[in-house]
Amino acid sequence: DAIGFICAVVSKPELSGIFNAVAPLHPTREQIHRQNSTQFGFELGVFHGFSERIVTSKRVANELWYEFLKPDPLGFWQS
């Protein structure tokens, strides 16, 4: 997705501004850490003070017409 996103940005030089190249789906950090700890055998850490802020990639979809190959961070490590 990183390479696809870069190619999409370069192909539209008329656009400017900030594009957030983040997966469009937003599981919690706890969900991601729990899954990765189980899958890779890591000890689960303790987390405090999670932000409720969501960074969105809507502009990527709307202006670059880019469709993420891996839209869900919970599926990043699956084929």
Image (cartoon, grey):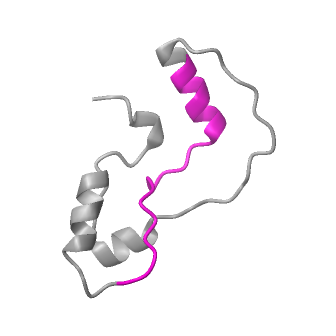
Of residue 18 and residue 54, the one placed in the foreground of this image is: 18
Q: Is residue 29 magenta?
A: yes
Tell which residue pokes out farthest to the top in this image.
Answer: 41
Instruction: Give the image location of residue 1, x and y in percent.
Output: 30, 51
Is 13 on the left or on the right of 53, as rendered? left
Instruction: Give the image location of residue 23, x and y in percent.
Output: 43, 53
> In percent of the image, x 38 and y 49: which residue is there?
71
Could you tell me which quadrant the C terminus lies in?
A: top left
| Up-down relation of residue 18 to residue 54 (above or below) | below
Instruction: Give the image location of residue 27, x and y in percent.
Output: 57, 43
Is 38 on the left or on the right of 14, as rendered? right
> In percent of the image, x 35 and y 69: which residue is there?
61
Residue 49 sits in quarter:
top right
Is 65 on the left or on the right of 37, as rendered? left
Residue 60 sits in quarter:
bottom left
Q: Which residues are magenta?
A: 16-37
Q: How many marks?
A: 0
Tell which residue pokes out farthest to the bottom in this image.
Answer: 14
